[in-house]
Every structure is written in structure tokens, then in C-alpha cells.
Amino acid sequence: MKFNNDEIKKIAHLARININELEIGQVSEKLEGILGLIDQMTKVNTDNIEPMAHALDITQPLREDKVTEGDIREKSLELSKETNQSLFIVPRVIE
Amino acid sequence: MINLSLKELSDSLKEKKFSSVELTQFFLDRLDLYNSSINAFISFDKDKSLAMARNADAMIQEGRQNYLTGIPIAQKDIFCAEGWKTSCGSRMLDNFIAPYDATVISKFNEVGAVNLGKTNMDEFAMGSSNETSFYGNVKNPWDIKAVPGGSSGGSAAAVAGMLAPAATATDTGGSIRQPASLCGLTGLKPTYGLVSRYGMIAFASSLDQAGPMCHTAEDCAAMLNVMTGHDPKDSTSVQREKENYLKGIHDPIKGLKIGIPKEFFSEGLEPEIEKIIEQGIDEYKKLGAEIVEISLPNNHLSIPVYYVIAPAEASSNLSRYDGVRYGYRTKEYDDLMDMYCKTREEGFGNEVKRRIMIGTYVLSAGYYDAYYLKAQKIRRLISEDFKKAFEKCDVILGPSAPSVAFPIGDKKEDPLKMYMQDVYTISTNLAGLPGLSMPAGLMNNLPVGMQLIGNYFSEAKLLNIANIFQTNTDWHNLSPKGFE
């Protein structure tokens, strides 16, 4: 498995991580190594094997939708770098 | 006070030999003295700890003492604790003061345990040497030029260096058992779903599980008694009656069938470690256990499977760190996309970025079946191996890690070498089984861990089996020089 620069840039973009042009070579080398390890899986016959998403056979439990912690708006907003009244502020996305 | 078990500390508090404030101050003083040399804690808050100790003393005075009331516990910095900085070892959360308590933290608070501080860890629990932490690497008290293991390296170093009587930790692929092994401690990863994950910062949600890290199995049992229990706030928390893990801890183990997986003794294991594990097996024979050979034929696939599933889940879990609502935000940016991408470039370390990118890749269009679905199918095969093994034996025994503590920097630049540290531990996470590591000998004066793997919800049995070993051997009583 070999990545070219555009592929690495595409993965980084999907992951929303900026990647420095100078680092691309090193990053792709490390990722190729890990994928080489992962490729050991290809030799295994998995016909008719049910995928296992979870360790235990559990079903999604339901509970009543009620407020348990009261109003935590102020507490939550305090953690943000930029807020205005009750809103989180981000750069303008609609012109 | 440093050589006392949790039981002895509890009894001493009851008999008023010392107060919780005195005990807490004693460990805070040790922290002042030793933390700079091993970097086990990311943050601590003496005023908060001492206030908790005063509250515990009042509880004891009023006759409301529990086993852990008034005892200082080091908390891995992955657990949100209200009003405490909770960084998960990352620059991304360097400014994050948790606005609520994780269920594990609430449970310790309810019994009046004292939060001694937040322990260092690999960034977002990704690592096996504690070298990926934003706060610098942790040093192993047994050899300060060596790593303590990871990701719960701070918890391990804190307990091994006797800066705390016990600690919490988490284990996604071996992050409790491998550092316990490298630092000469007893650590237990419970069955998936036994301990609530609410407020425990997520890495790979189908694998993450919290557990205790202590000197002995008995101490682990006391910690587990507090940590377990159904939690409606975690949808994967199991609904079953709460057990008392101390109850059968001294039960005889005569007739116990111990399975030895031949795959755990193949290439890659230090011969000296193999010898020590064989001595451990002989000890169990003397104690009346029967040894049977078993096979886990797909164990060698656990690392490749893990490095699909864990990064896939991580790439999704860590998408929440976007600089909008909390955590790090880059200083200069042109637009929203630029803000996301720069925030994540600067806020995450290299190993975390690598894993997010691997996870993103294996889940991306066109690759899902070849990687993620394939990994889930092999996960089933690995889990079936254990099912078959437990038809032949009650418990599985082997090494916890392929080596003892290795020099700082030794594997840092080679992720593939580092990943092999978890070759004996990852399969239990994939299957969701409980696993325990305990000290079983020394190699070059460094601790060697022996692992016990049990069937689902067999924690009480594992702790019992480990405790019987510890009542007949002394390895768990050894401590590193220079921390007395």
C-alpha cells in the first residue's frame, strides 16, 4: 500500500486536520506501515462470519426523557473561547 | 503510611491512628517531593483534596465510614471531575475544567474517598509508554530512564512510587495491564460494561473500560466494589446485581483449571519472562491448580484488527474537538473550515493524528468492507477462540507484556514496535473479557507481570486467584528503591 500526496491530503481533509506540505512524506510513511500491519487480515477467510460490532449482546436501553441536571447553559458556555449571550460564536458561514 | 494496604489504611482511620487530613497531607507531601522526578501527575489541587479529607473525617466521626472513606486515590486524567482540570493528556483539553463528574468520580465521592490529583497519561489514552502526553513523559520509579508503560502510565508510576495508595486507570487495548506489568502492580480491566464510561473521555467506545490499579488483588477488589454498578447514563452499562469482590477473595483454588495458550509463548517473548511465567504456573500447581494447554489461534490477528477498530471509533469520537464549544482553538483563521483544521493540527499530537487519519481512511468510501467489516468479522473469530478455550479451563494464564520496562525513546519513533507491547492484552478487549496483571518476578531488577484472563463477569474469581498467589508469594511487596 502506497499513498501519493493527494491521497494523504484527502484523508487529512476528511479528518479536518491541517497538514504541512513538508510533513506529508513522513506521515504517509507511518500510515503505510500501519496499513501494512492491518493487511495481515486479508489472508483470513471470513466467509459466513457474522461481524461483531460489540463485545456483549446488548440492546439499546430506553429511558424517560426528563431533565436530570437542570439548567447548565452558563456552565457550558463558559468553556468556549467565544460566546455571545447564549450562543457559541464561529466564523461566518453564510454570506 | 506508605506500606499499608487499603484495608489497613481504612482500619487506621477507623481507630483514629491518623485522620484523613493527615493521611492526605502525607501523600501531598510525597507528591511535592517526588512528582518532579517521575511526572506522574498532570495536576493536583491541595485545597480541594484537603477539603475532601475534612469531609471524610466528618463522615468517619459520624459513623458513616466506608472501606475507602478518607483514603486518597489518584484519578487518571481521563475522568471528568467537576471543577478539576481534565486534559486527557492533550493540548486540546489543556484549558478544560470539567463541568460535571464522571460516574466513576461520583462513586468515589459518594463513599468519601479523597481525589488526590489527576494522573498523567498518553494523549487520549493512545500509547503504551506514556510518551505521547502533552505534559511530557512519565518515568518508571523502578528505573527513571525507562517508561512506565501506557496509557495509564501516570497512575502506574504514582502507585509504584507510593505517591498514592491506589489509582484508577482505563484499558482499551492493555492500558491498565501493561503499565501494571511494567511497574510491578496489580491492575484489573473488568468485563466491558461493568464500570460506567459516563464522563470517561472516549477513545474507542466498544473497547474502553475503567478499572483499578493497586499493589494487591485485595486492594483492587475494594476499589472495584466502589467503581461498578449499573448506570443509566451509559447505554452500554450492564444491568446486573452488584457483587462484593472481597467476599470470596480467600477461597481455596484447589481443582482450578488454568489454561495456558501456546500462542502466548511464541516468538517475541523475552525468554527470561517466559521462565518467570513458568515459575508462576508451578506456584499455582503447588496450590492445587490443574494446568491444561489451550489454543487461541487467532490471537496474532488481534493487533491488526485493533488498529482498524480502535482508530475507526477514535476518528468518530475525536471529531467533537473542533474548537467551537470547549477546548483549544487556534489563534488565527480565515473561515470555519480553516479554524477546524488548524485547531486540530495544533491541538492534537502526532500519534493521535495518525490514528484519526487511519480511522478516517478505513471508514472512507470504498474501503469500509475491506477494512472495517473485515476487522469486525475477525473480531468474532478472536472472541470465539476464547469461548472454546473456556470450555476447557476456568481461567487463562500468560504474560502481560512481551518485555519489561524499556528505555524512554526506544520505540517512540516506531509505532509498529510500540503496538507489539499489547500483543497479549488486546484480544481480551476485542472479546470484552476481564483481564488482570500482577507482579510475578523481576528481570534485570524490573518487574514482570503475569496475566490472568477470565470469562465474562468473572472478576471475583480472577481477584480470588490472584490473591491466593499473593498470599503465597512476595512479588507484590517489592518496591522501587529511592521512594521509601
Image (tube, helix red, strand yellow):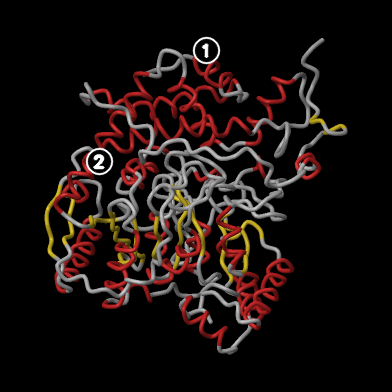
Q: With respect to residue B27, does B341 lie above or below? A: above
Q: Tell us which disc is closer to us: 2 or 1.
A: 2
Mark seen at residue A6? 1
For this orientation, the residue located farthest to the top is: A95
In this view, the residue in front, B392 or A37, is B392
Q: Residue furthest front?
A: A64
Q: Where is residue B215 drawn, in percent x and y?
A: 42, 70
CA separation in Å, label 2 and label 1: 35 Å
Percent position (x, y) of residue B166? 50, 68
Quarter assignment of residue B242 = bottom left
Mark number, residue A31:
none
Q: Residues within 10 Å of mark 1 (few under 14, many from 20)?
A: few
Vertical order, B119 against B16 (above or below): above
Query: Can residue B39 be seen?
Result: no
Say which element carries label 2.
Answer: helix
Residue B320 in the figure: left or right of residue B412: right
Q: Residue at x 71, y 49 (%)?
A: B99
**Disc assigned to residue B299:** 2
Whole-percent x, y for residue B185 in the image: 40, 65
User: In this rendering, does residue B349 appear at all?
Assistant: yes
* Residue drawn at (12%, 53%) of the image: B293
> Could you tell whether B30 is left or right of B452 in the image?
right
Tag 1: residue type? Answer: Asp
Q: Nearer the viewer, residue B212 or B456?
A: B456
